[in-house]
Amino acid sequence: MYAVTLLGLLGLLAVPATSKALKYAIPVSLKATDCTFPANYTVSNFTIYTDRTDSSKNSTSFLFDDPRTGINTSCSRNSTSKLIGSNRWPCDDSNVEFIYQTTGIAGLTLIETACPGNVPQFEASGLIRPDLACTNSTSGTTCVAKQSPIVGDFDSLEPAPPPSR
């Protein structure tokens, strides 16, 4: 009995981290593809800055890591960033985008291309709500996440919107 229990335990320990269950359904059109679907991610060093007088100086930055797909990238929005569509910001890896908003569905939404190169293209998304510690200065407010890293789950898989022109 102990040997079976020990073997069972060793079997559980040998399961790779990539076996995490998905929190969304995979469309039939993608089930036959040979790719790794995004499941969860971490956000580290999440920081936002809000300038008191010049909103062009506002910024958001963090590090994104998806251990399942192997994407590890820096993400930021600042005065030189180019908006994608109506509300998305790019990360250094073009397969990852983000939305940070303080109104409506407040929080940080991460969007990752699922199975890059497939047609039609799908993307996984998930929302986290960082708990922030903020410091005011004469020029503005800097807020950092109280927890780092923050673990999030991709809980949606939808067709990607058409590219903006």
Image: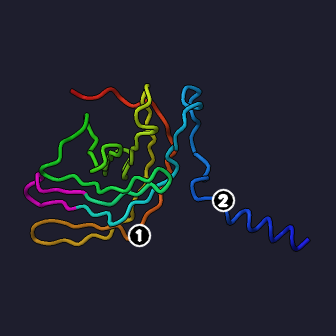
Comparing 122 with 12, the one in front is 12
Q: Are marks 2 and 1 in contact (CB under 8 Å)?
A: no
Instruction: Report the side of 109 relative to 15 (left or right).
Output: left
Quadrant location of the N terminus?
Answer: bottom right
Q: Residues within 10 Å of mark 2 (few under 14, many from 20)?
A: few
Q: Is residue 46 magenta?
A: no
Q: Secondary structure at mark 1?
A: loop
| Quadrant for the C terminus in the image | top left
Residue at 47% in and 50% down = 69
Quarter location, residue 58: bottom left
Nearer mark to the viewer, of 2 and 1? 2
The answer to whether 38 appears left or right of 10 in the picture is left
Q: Residues within 10 Å of mark 1 (few under 14, many from 20)?
A: some
* Label drawn at residue 147: 1
Tell whether position 56 is magenta: yes
At a point 33% along the width and 60% down the height, the residue shown is 63
- Which x, y percent locates residue 112? 40, 44
Question: In which quarter of the view is residue 143 placed?
Answer: bottom left
**Residue 64 location (% of width, % of height):** 37, 57
Colour scheme of the picture: rainbow
Q: Is residue 165 above or below residue 143?
A: above
Mark 2 lies on residue: 15
Query: Residue at the location (30% across, 60% down)?
Result: 62
Q: Residue furthest left?
A: 53
Q: Earlier in the sequence, mark 2 or mark 1?
A: 2
Q: Three-letter amino acid code at disc 2?
A: Val
Left or right: 73 in relation to 30? left
Q: Where residue 88 appears, x then y in whole percent?
A: 28, 41
Q: CA distance from mark 2 to mark 1?
A: 27 Å
Question: Which residues fall within the magenta stretch?
Answer: 49-60
Give the x, y percent position of residue 38: 49, 46
